Amino acid sequence: MKAKPGPVGRGLVPRRKSAKHPDFTIIRGGRVLDARARRADPADILVTGDTITEIGAPGLKAPAGATVIDARGKLLHAGLVNAHTHAHGNLAKGMGDLWTLELLLTAGPWISGNRSLEDKYLSAKLGAVEMVLKGCTAAYDLPFEWPAPTSEGLEAVGRAYAEVGMRAHVAPMMADRTFFEAIPGLIDVLTPGMRKDVEKLRLAPWKTSVDNMRKALRAWTLDRTQVRLGVAPTIPHHCSDDFIRACVELAKEYELGIHTHVAESKVQAVVGLQRYGKTLTAHLDDLGVLGPRFTVAHGVWLDGDDMKRLGDRGASVAHNPGSNLRLGNGLADMRGMLDRKVNVGVGTDGANCSDNQNVYEAMRLASFVSKGQTPDLERWVTTEEVVLAATEGGARALGFGDKIGRLAPGYKADIVFLDLGHVNWIPFNDPTNQLVHTEDGTGVESVMIGGRMVVEQRRVTTVDVAALARDAEAARARLARVNAPTKEICGRLAAVVGRFCPGLAHTPYHITRYVGT
Ligand SMILES: [Zn+2]
C-alpha cells in the first residue's frame, strides 16, 4: 500500500515542515504498548513510506521535512486483526435473535438473498468502516455469493476494503451441498412443498466455484499486500471431498489461505461423526487441508486430538467467542489450543450473528469465556495472550504475519491511537489488562494503516460515511421488499429445523479436552 500522509485533523496534527521528505512521518510522544511486558513507555516512531523503520526514546532523530504527529496523551498499539468475519453480514446486523447456527443458516437466503454487486460492495464497506473506527486494521473475510462466488463479487468486496484503507484476506464461502443436504435426515422430515423450496436453493456444481475462483485470481488488480484472496470451503460436510481436494490444490497453486468453519456447533460435530466416522478435523486432515495456511473458524467442539493435529501442522483457529455465545454453540477452549501450539486469532464473526465488528469486545469475551470454563487458574488465558492473539496471531492466520500485528521496525505502520484522557484509561494502571478488559473501542481516536491516517479524531477520512449510510438504508429497504417471499419460506423451514436440530444437539458427544498437552 502506498503511503500517504493523512489529511490534517484537529487533535493529532501532522505538521509538514517542508515538502522535502513526504515519505517520512515521525510520531512523537505516544506511549507504545508492549503487551508482554505490560508496559507502555513514551517512545517516538519513525515511519518511512508505509513501514515502521525505527522506534526509539523520545527525541528520536527524524529526517528534515518529516511529517510530525504529536501523540502525547495517546496509547499506541498495533492495529487489531479480525480473524473471522463475513462481508455480507453487515447489511443483516440485528435481523435475528433466537437463532442457533442451524437457524441462522436456514435464514441465510432471506437475510443475504438477492444482493446486487452494489449491495455486496456496500455491505463490505460498512463492515470495514465499523472495524477501522474500532481499532481494527485487517480482517479475514468470508463473503458469500449464491450460487457460487464470482470474480466481480470478490472484486467488489476487495475494492470496498481498499477504498476504506484496510487490509483483508478475502476468502469466499463455497459449498456444493445446501445446509438441508448436508444434515443427514433433514430433507426426509420436510413436506413435499418444502422440498421443492429447498430444491431452489441448490448451489452451483463445485467445478463452477473453482473455475470462478481461478478467474478472480487472474483478474485481481488490487495490491495483494493489502487485499488478497483465499478460499473457504465453508463447512466440511457442506462440501464434497472432491471439492475440498480441489480447494487444497488451488491454495497450493496460488499460495492462498484456506478457511473453514469446523465444529462450530455440536450439531456439526455430531454430523461429522455420522458422515465420516471421525471428527471433522480428522476428515480434513485426511484430505490434506491441515497446514500453516489453514484456519479453522470457531473450533468450539474440537477435541484434544483435533487440536494436536492443528498445532502439529502449524494451523490457526479464529476464536469468535461473541458469535459462539450468541448462537448458543458453547465455549471454545483457547487454553487447550495454545497448549497444543495452535496459532489462535480472535474474530467477531459476521454482523448477522454477533452483531458488531468490535475486536475489543471479542478480546474481552475471549478472556472471560476462558475464565468461565473452569476454576483451574492455569487453564485460564491471560490478557497478554489475548492481545497477542488479536494482533500477532490474527496477522499470521491472514498470511500477513511478517508484516503486521506488531509495532516494530520492518512492520507496516498499522497503529491505533487510543486517547488516554478517555474515561477507559482513567486511571492508567496496567495497559494490557485495560486494553482487553476495559477498552471497548470508544477510546479510539485515530487509526493509521500503512502510514496513512484512515481515522482521525474519530472520523473516517477515506470514505463519505453519510453517503454510505444513505446507500445502506436504500439497500436495506429494497432488500426487505424483494426478500419478503423468501422470508416466509425460511420461516416455514425454520419451524422444522428448530425441532430437528436440537435433537441432534442432544446426542451424547463426549470430547476429551484436558488430556496431556
Ligand atoms: Zn463464520
Image (cartoon, grey):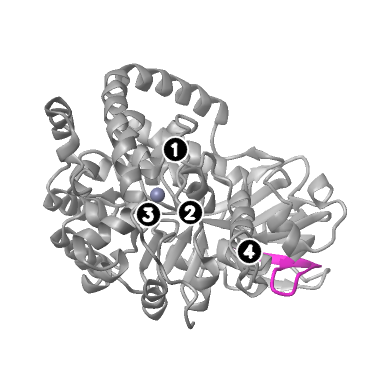
Whether 47 is among the magenta residues is yes
Would residue 371 appear left or right of 180 to someone viewing this image? Answer: right
Q: Secondary structure at mark 3?
A: helix
Q: CA distance from mark 1 to mark 4?
A: 25 Å
Q: Earlier in the sequence, mark 3 or mark 4?
A: 3
Mark sitting earlier along the chain (2/4): 2
Task: Residue type at mark 3: give it.
Answer: Lys
Compared across the picture, whether 358 is left or right of 434 comes to left
| Mark found first going from the N terminus, 2 or 3 | 3
User: Where does label 3 land, which residue?
Assistant: 266
Which region shows up in magenta?
33-48
Q: Which class describes the residues within 10 Å of circle 1: few (<14), some (14-19), or many (20+)? A: many
Which mark sits nearer the N-terminus, 1 or 4?
A: 1
The residue labelled by disc 2 is 330
Q: Is residue 295 above or below residue 57?
A: above
Report the residue marked by disc 1.
Answer: 352
In the picture of the structure, the residue carrying the numbered disc 4 is 387
